[in-house]
Amino acid sequence: MSHKILHIGSAEKFMPSFIELVKENFDFNCHEFYLSKGMAEKDLPQSDNIYLLPNKKRLSKLKHYSQILIKMHQADKVILHSLVDISIVKLLFLSPWLLKKCYWVIWGNDLYTYKFDKRNRRWRVREIYRRPVIKKMGYLVTYMQGDINLAREWYGAQGEYKECLMYTSNIYKSVEIKKSANSQVSIQLGNSANSTNNHIEIIEKLARFEDNNFRVYTPLSYSDQNHAKKVIKIGNELLGDKFYPMTDFMPFDDYLKFQGSVDIGIFNNSRQQALGNIITLLGLGKTVYMRDDTSQWRLFKDKGLKIYNIQDFNNINYRHHENNVLLVKQYFSKETLIQQLTELF
């Protein structure tokens, strides 16, 4: 008899391609998706086993979460795509017997809220629910041992570690790289408007190289738009026309073409973040800088990839890293992802 697998999450940018991957490679009738609204909801495939929270009205939400609670009891496995939804956390807090069949796919912000969110009354109340849920979660799903270590350190998490790339954004992508006719160096700074990108620190560093021919492309189309305005203001002041804020959301294929044109990627993220962006650039052989105190630094170093410490950033030079291309193709592959999902399901 086939397992019933319940997926709970939101219609964020990872989800449509993940659902398509499941449809193409597994028995889709065994999977149900209960999703809250997100930036990619219009891209979700139409299917009888995909349920989207209809609106934010109280009655609709009550029906949605009541149905999720019933489905969690009926399912053989429950895959939690992130733990940012406090309503889901509360359901699990009140039904701890469900946790043994729950798989928490760690996205980053759902773990690092422990360290980076303001420790106000709202945070403390949320942690009252989160701590016992995370501690007793049956399985922890990621491909970064560092995040597992932090979950155990911060929350006493006891769940079994399941290694999985999980989403197609985390696999190697072949992109045609067009050679630029000019000598201008293209730099990608960060992946979003989240303040944990620490954009301004890097903008101040880059301002020292005003005589160099470069342009800084900064994705700011989602996350904290107040922070985005601050970054744009300071970027324009310090870098002038060398600074190019990317404020409009780009279709996936267009974004890949953009990354194909990048020479240097700088990710000053102070937590696990921007992995899809970084993997794509490493898989294209680009020069990538990041912080050495993050779990992604340890991941890429353990895989033998050539990455650079932001603390050592002292020029605008770049070079192609062919060995990185080979290593990314080998581990961050669609075949690896399908095999890991096969074991997970």
Image (tube, rainbow, N blue to C red):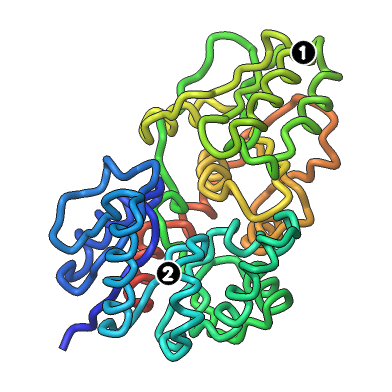
Residue at position x 41%, y 35% in the image: 175
What percent of the width, then of the height, locates residue 251? 37, 31
Q: Quadrant of the N terminus?
A: bottom left
Residue 310 is left or right of residue 299, and the answer is right
* Among the 4 quarters of the image, the one containing residue 228: top right
Number of numbered markers: 2
Q: Quadrant of the C terminus?
A: bottom left
Q: Which is more N-terminal, label 2 or label 1? A: 2
Q: Secondary structure at mark 1?
A: helix
Residue 325 is left or right of residue 145, and the answer is left
What percent of the width, then of the height, locates residue 15? 35, 53
Crowd around label 1: few <14 · some 14–19 · many ≥20 (10 Å):
few
What percent of the width, then of the height, locates residue 229? 65, 24
What percent of the width, then of the height, locates residue 119? 75, 59
Figure check: 17 above or below 238 = below
Give the CA separation, mark 1 to mark 2: 43 Å
Kind of residue at disc 2: Leu
Looking at this view, is 261 or 325 the one in front? 261
Residue 47 is left or right of residue 34, and the answer is left
Looking at this view, is 342 or 156 the one in front? 156
Residue at position x 83%, y 25% in the image: 204
Residue at position x 27%, y 42% in the image: 43
Kind of residue at disc 1: Glu
Label placed on residue 237: 1
Figure check: 208 above or below 119 = above
Q: Secondary structure at mark 2?
A: strand
Q: Which residue is labeled 2 in the image?
A: 80
Residue at position x 58%, y 61% in the image: 110
Crowd around label 2: few <14 · some 14–19 · many ≥20 (10 Å):
many
